[in-house]
Amino acid sequence: MRVLLVEDDRRFAAALTAALRRSGYDVDHVRTGAQALAAAPCDLVLLDLGLPDEDGVDVCRRLRERSDVGVIMLTARSEERDRVVGLRCGADDYVVKPFGFAELRARMEAVLRRARPRPAGARIVGDLRLDLDRHQAYARDEPIDLTRKEFEVLAILTEQPGAVVRRERLLTEVWRTSWPGTSHTLDVHLGTLRSKIGDAVRIQTVRGVGYRVVAEA
């Protein structure tokens, strides 16, 4: 998931960016409202209200006019009236500084779940077909018996065939955690997946980064 962080405090932004990347997010950081409005499309915006060029409320309103992207406001403004204004201008959530990273990540996941469109139809990669509505996978039209988490891992890996998916993203989205102890569980699931799908597609390990799915030639 791509996150746009709009924050003019460089030290705070650097710490938050590092924490988000460790959790598997791709992060772009900008410092002004103008830069936020000119930024590339993303899945979620973390928006500070106290920007140097314009108020974050106005930035949120303009973002909302042109997109349904999720917006979470990050601010030191804790008064109820400020929260009301922020939510009424189109923000999906409002987090008051200082905050714990675990809380922020949980709120991000909730907003992304609400904003993410419901999967529909079939996804085909090589000889593998995923029925996203029924949570059923097929190898050369033969059904594969997958657990729910195995299917979720495979669905993420096949979103963009050939693109590398970080381990942290799989842990965050499938197991809702970035705890290193879960990493072994991911390895077990990937081993089982490789066994079940055979040579319909290949799941390649990119050492130190993550995994990618490629169709057999």
Image (tube, rainbow, N blue to C red):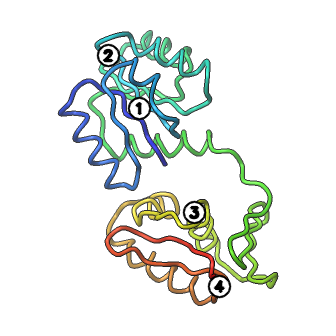
For the residues labelled 4 and 3, the Cα–Cα distance comes to 15 Å
For the residues labelled 1 and 3, the Cα–Cα distance comes to 23 Å
For the residues labelled 4 and 2, the Cα–Cα distance comes to 50 Å
Q: Is residue 75 above or below residue 70?
A: above
Q: Which residue is mark 2?
A: 51
For the residues labelled 1 and 4, the Cα–Cα distance comes to 38 Å
Q: Which residue is mark 3?
A: 156
Q: Which residue is mark 1?
A: 46
Q: Position of residue 96 (x, y in %)?
A: 34, 26
User: Residue 216 or 79: which is nearer the viewer?
Assistant: 216
Residue 46 occupies quadrant: top left
Q: Is residue 48 left or right of residue 119?
A: left
Q: Residue at x 58, y 21 (%)?
A: 64
Secondary structure under the numbered disc 3 in the rendered image: helix
Q: Position of residue 3 (x, y in %)?
A: 43, 40
Question: Pointers 4 and 2 in contact (CB under 8 A)?
Answer: no
Classify the position of the C terminus by image quarter.
bottom right
Question: Pointers 1 and 3 in contact (CB under 8 A)?
Answer: no
For the residues labelled 2 and 1, the Cα–Cα distance comes to 12 Å
Question: Pointers 3 and 2 in contact (CB under 8 A)?
Answer: no
Q: Position of residue 196 (x, y in %)?
A: 64, 87
Q: Is residue 82 above or below residue 129?
A: above
How many residues crowd around disc 2 within 10 Å: few (fewer than 14), some, or many (20 or more)?
some
Q: Which residue is mark 4?
A: 197
Question: Pointers 4 and 3 in contact (CB under 8 A)?
Answer: no
User: Residue 158 or 46: which is nearer the viewer?
Assistant: 158
